[in-house]
Image (cartoon, rainbow, N blue to C red):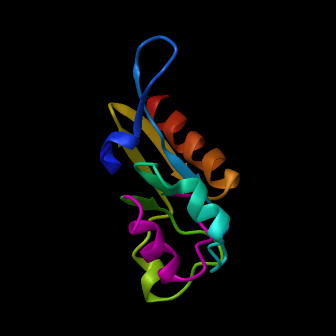
Amino acid sequence: MSQSDANFGIGALGFVMRRIGVISDTHGLLRPQAMDALRGCDPIIHAGDVGRPDVLDQLRGIAPVFAVRGNVDHGPWARELPESRLVEVDGCLIHVLHSLDDLASLWAAVAFRFL
């Protein structure tokens, strides 16, 4: 079985299921246990507080990575990360952000646009 085949399984209802890895608050440290848990996921979502760019490099060695910037992420590498983003996986949209405070301000902006 190839690595890409291992990312999918048949669910109880007969649907093909994909394992999506979600991690956050690594603060520059990616433990071996976290790496083991994320193997077989595709994609991996890092919800901020990455800490160091090599954390994202290590995760990219497993699967495609979608990351956002957290409050401890500073420097040129971190400025490349958005504060929030939409990730589409198999037609489903996942809104990724680090702080729930950002979610409240986002909903206020969305609500204002439709009023």
Above or below — where is 55 with respect to 1?
A: below
Left or right for 24, reference 80: right
Q: Residue furthest bottom?
A: 75
Residue 73 image position (x, y, % from top left)? 58, 78
Vertical position of residue 7 compared to residue 61: above or below:
above
Q: Residue at x 52, y 50 (%)?
A: 21
Q: Residue furthest front?
A: 1
Q: Which residues are magenta?
A: 46-63
Residue 99 in the image, given as x and y percentages of width and height? 66, 57
| Residue 114 quadrant | top left
Q: In the picture shown, does residue 19 fall above or below 75?
A: above
| Picture residue at 60% right of the left edge, 79% below the top | 51
Q: Nearer the viewer, residue 11 or 105?
A: 11
* Quarter in which the N terminus is drawn: top left
Toward the viewer: 57 or 53? 57
Instruction: Based on the picture, tell me whether residue 55 belongs to the magenta stretch.
Output: yes
Q: Looking at the picture, tell me which residue is in the foreground, 103 or 41.
A: 41
26 vs 78, left or right, is right
Question: For the view shown, which residue lies furthest in the top direction?
Answer: 13
**x, y percent for residue 61:** 39, 69
Q: Is residue 49 magenta?
A: yes
Q: Number of numbered discs present? A: 0
